[in-house]
Amino acid sequence: MFSNLVLFQISILTFLGGALVGLLLRNNRFARHAIFGSAMIGSVFTIMFSIDIITGKPMTWMVPNVIPFFDLEIFVDGIAAFFLLIVGIVSFAVSVYSIGYSKEYQVKKRTMVLGFLFNVFILSMVLVVASNNAFFFLLFWEVMSLTSFFLVIYDHDKEENIKSGMTYLVMTHFGTAFIFASFLLGYIQTGSFSFDSFRHDSAGFPLLVKNLVFVFALIGFGTKAGMVPLHVWLPKAHPSAPSNVSALMSAVMIKIGIYGMIRTIFDFSGFGASPDFAWWGMLLIAFGSVSAIIGVLYAVVERDIKRALAFSSIENIGIILIGLGLSVVFTSFQLAAFAVLALVASMYHTINHAVFKGLLFMGAGSVVSVTHTKNIEHLGGLVKQMPWTALLFLIGAISISGLPPFNGFISEWFTMQSLLSSYHVPSTILQISIAFASLPFALTIGIAAATFVKLFGMTFLSKARSKFAINIKEVPHSMILGMSILAAVCVLFGVAPYLGTSLISTAFHMPSQPSSPFDSIAIQNSSGKSFANLSMPVVVIMLSSVSIAIFGFIRVLSGNTKKTKYGTWDCGFGSLNERMEYTPTSLSQPIRTVFKVFFRPHNQTEKESFGENPYQLKTIKIETAIKNIFEDLLYTPIVSSFVFFFDKVRRLQTGKINAYLLYIMITLVLLLLFVRLSNNA
Amino acid sequence: MIVIGLAQVLVILVLAPLLTGIIRKTKARTQKRIGASVLQPYYDLLKLVRKDEIVSDQASWIFRACPWVNFAAMTTAAFFIPVFLVYTPFGLVGDLLLVVGLFALGRFFTMLAGLDVASSFGGLGSSREMMISALLEPALFLSIFVVAITYGGTNLSTLIGASSNASFLPHPQIIFAAIGLFIIILGETGRLPFDNPATHLELTMVHETMILEYSGKSLALMEWSQSIKQIILFTLMVNIFVPWGISSSVLLSSLAVGFLAFIGKISLFGIFVAFSESSVAKWRLFRIPDLIAIAIATSMIGIVLCYL
């Protein structure tokens, strides 16, 4: 119907239009619909465009001299289109959700700014992925970082949000500096900022340059992706932003970091099938394992529902990096089939995480918007008052915990199989290291399930723990619809992995398997037998037919039985109330104790007793706190040494004019000396 | 083929309560009691199914769905287990990792059901289960790692086929994997020293607290699915590490031998577990990580041995 360029231009124009509406129109209901409506339409066109590219040919579009000496080069191949598809799907669902969600902000008269930034943010992500020139890539990257910064501090009347925003701003520019360095190395080697020339000439870079390009890109893009230890901004920034933006940031923006990493490794760094590059993969696996385990450990003890989700994003980025690293290791030892397997694992988890984390952040946003608290200590019992949100959140929770038959299981199954396939690697030390890396990976999956039992159970189940969770209503239809879209994708990608694998294989031009929806995914071992098989559609059929069969069987066996409702068993004391329930903190206490080396928990008990007897207590106050070891042990010393250094530097700035004249005098003398001495030589 | 596959599933479903009965009987005998008949678990299930149910007024649909989810997950897992034949036609559908995933699905809902009824008992059980299950996951995966690398697959037909062809204890790493898996099975099935299945004392119980509010057929389903999980894990243990007598062809005679060998092995293993349970006390909750660490360490030694 349309050529793919037209689709691309339409989507860009729609986002721009939405942004303009945000700037020009007055704040009212119509404008709100127009803003998020155009974001929706833009996302639909992005989805159409990316599917068009994945199934068809790459697209190139060049506008010469947009800025003097710099051509705007757009190049979208399958890989870029795959990430555009992620942007499109999540943005569409979040835009639908935002129509209802932003109503809350309309009262505060700032919806228009939110809408403007929202559209520009999505647009910048689309353009980052599509650009084919280091200059424009960095330009759009910066637009993406800045709009997201403004969105993080959108609720700027809270001091805390400004602080998180500043942390984010500093960290994101730290990362950008390294990305810039990585591209500059390419520029020095090729003399051009165009990605085409990087792609073309990178095989000829000296090995040192290749390694440097990779390391700089890993640091730079890793910062954006939230890789430990560069993750400190993420658990601050994501919870501070409005929930629809948190969904976009956690689901999509950090994936742009993954996109950058993939682009650099496979396209710009001269990576090839040589054991020289195996350490890249091992480095990725190491960072991935650390990110996964650190992310999930802090997620499980967290009380702020949005911050727990943010920590869990770090964990999932870790899992993605493990898959990517395995793919790099396999490629460098020319094990193409397993490299494909690991890359499918990594990319499947990328799209899965985008989908279920978007869903969970929207679910958390719904909860926060009706209860006005992010602290799950105050929540409970919402399943009765918000049945739809609860159901959709549960789908997200089961998916992210990697349980069959939802999508998280599929990508984690792929990752596990890739880890197992490491026995093909022809190096004993690497084999053993990768096998040991599966320890943190599996531990992560175990704790992730515990995390989401806690988040879902404490928010939606049992009795309300405070007045925040009483007398609330289900959220508007548009919000439920937005969440349902992503929940449907979660189910679809879990029940029919064929969809996901064929999408990824087509996008990345890899051999595809399984070849039909009901075929099983098959991996063979070295003697040609089946190493593993998985056919999710059949598993789902089994699950459902077993349920029906057993339902009938029990029905026949039991005859006519009654169901009576009665209070929960209270040991005969008769006054079971919400203060006797387990709290989120106590629920995760065993895990906190086992892993106390990471948390340095700090408990303080103050007792006040009646008179002499220490057992007759009047009041008891218990304070518990945990530490974030990375902030305390890594960042605080760095920040304080900087502050110390610049404190010393500040002494130069006395504010007295005499002193400044003296500085000028000294500088002049030094310069004259310099000129004199260099002339002599 | 499909018929034999379904027969293996039925064997697991039907024999699951019997295994529980054998273990209880053995424990009673070691404690100088006569104990109930080995068929008692069947009578219990039948009695529970016919009883009226009392459901907490706090409970939501999650609490009511949990027994069904559990049962469906465990039964589906049973499809992938070769019991008396080295092969199951459902091996093309799922592998050992799927079985582990289905167990985790059941456990996820059980933990939620524990929280759903708003009593502090449920929270207590879920909290402890969260820790134990999170720690068991890596131990389990590592021992699967050793077995899968040694026998060339997580597909259970391949795995058990290769182990039944191998000579007696062919690889040193298998012994380490067996030690690791034995500890994990005690944890997964909630046996001493992890959890005492015979107690109703809040200081010690884990699994029982989460299902405390269940009654009638929901309780029957929970108990039955727990037994199925137990027999699946025991079957895996005996068939991977001592695959003696397991049938490798579909001839009626060898199937009969395989079936009898299975009954013998699983009962012996059940009696062994019961004896080991009788000789240890319940460990303090925060000593359990040490035990799991032993399982992890042995599996890691196994991995190193795989590659050396």
Image (cartoon, rainbow, N blue to C red):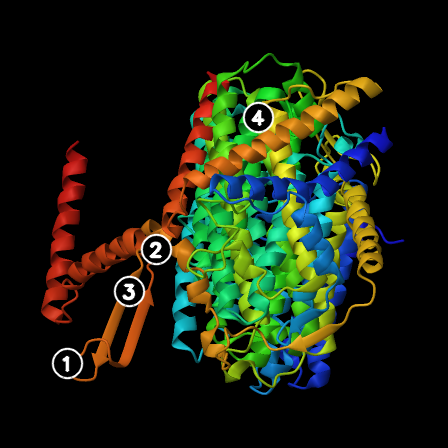
Which residue position holds label 3? Answer: A603
Tell me which chain the residue with mark 1 is part of.
A
Tell me which chain the residue with mark 2 is part of.
A
What amino acid is found at the position of numbered circle 4 in the picture? Val
- In the image, A429 versus A244, the foreground residue is A429
Which residue position holds label 1? Answer: A612
Location of residue A278 with respect to A153 vertically, above or below: above
- Mark 1 residue crowding within 10 angstroms, few (<14) / some (14–19) / many (20+): few
Check chain identity for marks 4 and 3: say if they share one. no
Q: CA distance from mark 2 to mark 1?
A: 36 Å
Check chain identity for marks 4 and 1: say if they share one. no
Residue B168 spot, x, y in % from top left: 57, 14
Q: Secondary structure at mark 3?
A: strand
Confirm whether residue B285 shows in the render.
yes
What's the mark number on residue A599?
2
Residue A140 spot, x, y in % from top left: 57, 56
What amino acid is found at the position of numbered circle 1 in the picture? Glu
Q: Quadrant of the C terminus of chain A?
A: top left
Q: Secondary structure at mark 2?
A: helix
Q: CA distance from mark 2 to mark 3?
A: 12 Å
1 vs 3, front mark: 1
Q: CA distance from mark 4 to mark 1?
A: 63 Å
Which residue position holds label 4? Answer: B147
Q: Looking at the image, which residue is at 65% across and 69% down?
A: A390
Check chain identity for marks 2 and 1: say if they share one. yes
Residue A56 spot, x, y in % from top left: 81, 41
- Mark 3 residue crowding within 10 angstroms, few (<14) / some (14–19) / many (20+): few
Callouts 2 and 3 close, C-beta under 8 Å = no
